[in-house]
Image (cartoon, grey):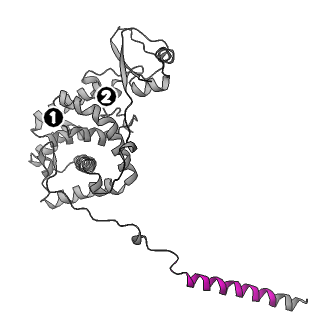
Amino acid sequence: MNTSVRFLSVVIVVFTAVLFTNTISKSNEPIIKNVAESYVIKALKLPEDLNLAGERVPLEKLDIKERMDRELLVNTYWQSNGLLLIKRANKYFPVLEPLLKKYGLPDDFKFLALAESGFIDETSSVGAAGMWHFMKQTGKEFGLEINNNVDERYHIEKSTRVAAEYLKKSKERFGSWTLAAAAYNAGNYGVSKRLEAQGVTSYYDAMLPDETERYVFRVLALKEIISNPEKYGFVYDKEDLYTLPKTYTVKVDTAITDIALFAKKFGTTYKDLKLHNSWLRENKLNNRSRKLYEIKIPVQ
C-alpha cells in the first residue's frame, strides 16, 4: 500500500470513530442529569416556639429570623457533621442530664456543651479543653486541678459542676439564661460592657462579636435538630447511635507509677482506661498530696 492510500485509510478510520461517538452520545442524551432530579435542597420553615431554657426567641424580628435560619440551614445541610453530633449526643446526654439537674442548670445547656466541643477530647486553637471547653485560668479559678499530670477540664462530672457554677453566676448577673449562654462564649465582662455601651438588656437587641452573634443560635439549632431529627432529614436506627460502655469506680488515694500496669490489674488496657479517664494526662498519677481520685474501670 502506497503512502497516499495509507493516509486516506487513517483519515477514514478517524472520521468514522468520531461520527460513531457523536451518534452514540446523541442517542443516549442526556448523559448527565441535573442534580435536582435526585436531590432537593429545601428552604426550612422555622418553628414558632423556639426557646432557650424557656426564654422565647423573638423570630418576628427580621434579623433574628435570618440568623436563626442561617444556623438551621448550616447544621441541617452539613449532614455528615449533623449525624455525628446526633450519634455523640446519644452517648453523652444520659451522663449530662442528671448532672445538669443536680447542679441546677436547665436541661437545654447540654446543647451548649455539644456546641462547644462536639463531645470530642480536642484542645481548641486558643487552649480551651474538655467537654465544656474551659481555658486553664477559668478552670483553676473554679477549683479544677490542671497541670501536666492531671487536667480535670476533661473530667465530665467535675467540669459540668464548674460550668453550672459559671453559668448560674452569669444568670444572676444578667437575669437571663440566653445572656448567660452568650457570656459563656464572650465572657461576662465583654457582654456586660457591650450591653452597657448600647443601652440594651437583651441578647437579641445587642450587637456582639461575630462569633457570639452566632453562638446562641447554633445552640438553638442543635436543640431543634436533635429534638426533631426526622423533621430535618436525619434517619437512623437506634443501633446506629453511639453509646457509652458501662464502668465501675475505683477510689485511689496514692500515686500510680504505671497506669498501663494498673489497668491490667483490673482486666483492661491502658487505652480503654484512658478513654474513660481522659483527665489522666500521663502514664502515671503523681498524687503527692494523697488526694482521693475516682477512676472509672470499663466493665469487660
Circle 2: residue type: Ile
**Residue 300, picture quadrant:** top left
Q: Work out which quarter of the rendered image holds the N terminus and state it.
A: bottom right
The picture places residue 97, in percent across and down from the top left corner, at 23, 33
Residue at x-position 34% and y-position 32%? 130
Counting residues from the N terminus, which is met first, the one under dot 1 or under dot 2? 2
At mark 1, the secondary structure is: helix
Residue at x-position 33% and y-position 27%? 153
Residue 39 versus residue 21 in the image, above or below = above
Residue depth check, mark 1 versus mark 2: number of the one nearer the observer = 2
Which sits in the foreground, 247 or 83? 247
**Label annotation for residue 156:** 2
Near mark 2 (Cα within 10 A), the count class, few <14, some 14-19 or many ≥20, is: many
Residue at x-position 15% and y-position 34%? 170
Proximity of marks 1 and 2: CB atoms separated by less than 8 Å: no
The picture places residue 140, in percent across and down from the top left corner, at 29, 23
Q: Where does the magenta region start and end?
A: 8-31
In the rendered image, which residue does mark 1 sit on? 170
Residue at x-position 50% and y-position 79%? 30
Which sits in the foreground, 101 or 147? 101
Q: Quick check: is 102 in the magenta stretch?
A: no
Residue 31 versus residue 46 in the image, above or below = below
The picture places residue 191, in percent across and down from the top left corner, at 18, 41
Is 78 left or right of 19, judged from the image as shown? left
Outermost residue on the right side: it is 1
**Residue 239, picture quadrant:** top left
Q: Quick check: is 10 in the magenta stretch?
A: yes
Marks 1 and 2, how far apart in space? 21 Å
Near mark 1 (Cα within 10 A), the count class, few <14, some 14-19 or many ≥20, is: many
